[in-house]
Every structure is written in C-alpha cells, then in structure tokens.
Image (cartoon, helix red, strand yellow):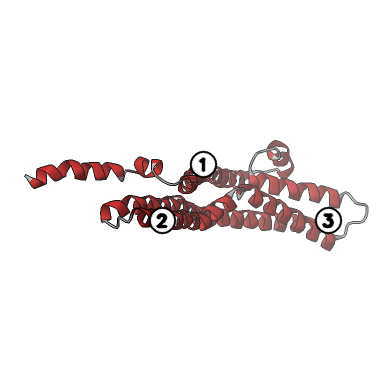
C-alpha cells in the first residue's frame, strides 16, 4: 500500500527534475547562464556544419585542380581557363603566374630575385587561403575552453542560492535541497554539452586544415620548381 502511495510522489519528483522544469525554476542568473550556453551550443553546431562542408569541398577541389594541372599540355592555356576558379590551389597557381609574368617582363632578368619573389607570392597566397578556411575556428576554441567555466559559475551561483534558501526555511531535508542542487548542476551539464563538441570539432578541423595547407605547400613547391626550370632556359 505504501509503495502505491509513493508512486505519484516519485513521478512528481521526476517531473520536477526534468530539464524544462529545472530551467523554469532556476534563478535569473542561472537562467541567463543556461540560455547563453544553449546559444553557444547552437553557434557551435552551425560552425561545425558550415566549416566541415567548406573544408571537404576545398580538399576535393584542390585534388581535382592539381590533377587537371598535371594533365594540362599548355600552362598558359590552362591559366586562361582555370585562373578564375574558386579553388585554393587555383589562387596559389594564379599568384605564381602573375608574379612570373611581372618578373620576366623586366628588361633585365634577375633569376635569383625572381625565384625569391615567386616563392613569396605563392607562400602569401597559401597563407591567405589557410586564413580564409580557418575562419571562425577560433570561436570553437573559445567556446570549448570557456563554456565549462561558465557552466561552473552557474552551478556555484545556484548552490549558493540553495544554501541561502535552506538557511531561510530551516529545512535541511533531501527533498528541499535536491531541486536547487539539480538546477545548479544542470548549468554545468549544459557547459559540457557546449564544450565537448566544440573541442572535438576544433581538433578535427585543425587537423584537416593542416593537411590542406601541407598539400597547398607541396603544390606551390612543385610549381615553383617548374618555373625555376623555365628560368634556367631563359
């Protein structure tokens, strides 16, 4: 009989500890922390989806461009056809061709200076492409490192409020303490919910970005070697 009477009470307590209930009954400061962490989580997933697509597309486009460049019989014609392509490797290639034409059009050709300018031009183009592809990855790093502390702040504040309520009511029973503690700990859970995907995505995307940068550098080095051989024939 006792167990039957306790069942509604248990169900009510479970409902009072649901995420929505914990949010609605939380202190205004804790609510602000929770809302901020939920927005940070939403922003995190927006960046993850957008950057994942951008990096995958860039890697695939670079591979196709390098393959087409290797098969091109005429570099000048290939430049005319593909210099405007929205591909990181194409912009590195264009930077090299533009610098080549400017340097070799001079009346007096300094081969060593030309090689140095070609390397600088393509390195700058590579750095610019990496900067463009890494846009907003710093946001993931910030959310991943700050969110747990923001959640912890909400937890500390909620626990302080719970102790203040306990002192005011002089009721130290578990039923009186549990809701306030649960609200406070929910803030920490939201902090981890925002931080964990951000850290994992940041590390994964940084690795993919490093691979793209390495491939661009290899392409630039190979193209620089080809242009350097052209200089030897001048």
Q: Residue at x 45, y 52 (%)?
A: 191
Q: Secondary structure at mark 2?
A: helix
Contact check, label 3 and label 2, Cβ < 8 Å: no
Disc 2 target residue: 164
Please tell me how crowded label 2 is: few (under 14), some (14-19), or many (20+) other residues with Cα within 10 Å: few
Earlier sequence position, callout 1 versus callout 2: 1
Q: Position of residue 135 (x, y in %)?
A: 62, 48
Q: Secondary structure at mark 1?
A: helix
**Foreground residue among 170 and 15:** 170
Q: Position of residue 32 (x, y in %)?
A: 50, 45
Is residue 58 toward the left or the right of residue 101 in the image?
A: left
The answer to whether residue 232 shows anywhere in this view is no
**Residue located 54% across and 51% down the image:** 140
Query: Is residue 165 positioned above or below 24 on the image?
Result: below
Please identify the quadrant where the N terminus is shown. top left
- The front one of 25 and 125 is 25
Q: Residue at x 64, y 46 (%)?
A: 88
**Label 1–label 2 contact, CB within 8 A:** no
Of discs 3 and 2, which sits in the foreground? Answer: 2
Residue 8, how many percent across, how many down?
18, 40
Q: Is residue 62 left or right of residue 122?
A: left
Marks 3/2: CA distance? 85 Å
What is the crowding at mark 3: few (fewer than 14 residues within 10 Å), some, or many (at least 20)? few
Residue 95 numbered tag = none
Q: Which mark is residue 234?
A: 3
Residue nearest the viewer, comparing 35 with 232: 35
Q: On the image, numbered disc 1 is attached to which residue?
A: 46
Mark 3 / mark 2, whichever is N-terminal: 2
């Amino acid at each position: 009989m006792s167990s039957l009477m306790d069942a509604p009470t248990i169900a009510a307590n479970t409902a009072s500890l649901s995420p929505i209930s914990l949010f609605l009954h939380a202190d205004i400061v804790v609510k602000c922390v929770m809302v901020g962490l939920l927005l940070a989580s939403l922003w995190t997933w927006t960046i993850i989806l957008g950057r994942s697509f951008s990096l995958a597309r860039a890697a695939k486009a670079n591979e196709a461009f390098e393959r087409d460049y290797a098969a091109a019989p005429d570099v000048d014609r290939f430049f005319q056809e593909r210099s405007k392509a929205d591909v990181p490797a194409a912009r590195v290639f264009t930077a090299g061709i533009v610098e080549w034409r400017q340097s070799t059009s001079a009346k007096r050709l300094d081969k060593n200076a030309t090689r140095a300018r070609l390397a600088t031009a393509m390195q700058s183009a590579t750095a610019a492409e990496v900067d463009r592809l890494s846009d907003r990855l710093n946001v993931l790093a910030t959310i991943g490192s700050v969110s747990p502390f923001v959640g912890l702040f909400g937890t500390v504040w909620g626990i302080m409020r719970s102790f203040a309520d306990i002192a005011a009511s002089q009721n130290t029973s578990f039923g009186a303490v549990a809701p306030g503690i649960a609200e406070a700990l929910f803030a920490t859970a939201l902090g981890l919910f925002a931080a964990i995907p951000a850290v994992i995505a940041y590390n994964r995307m940084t690795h993919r970005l490093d691979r793209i940068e390495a491939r661009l550098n290899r392409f630039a080095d190979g193209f620089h070697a080809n242009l350097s051989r052209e200089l030897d024939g001048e």
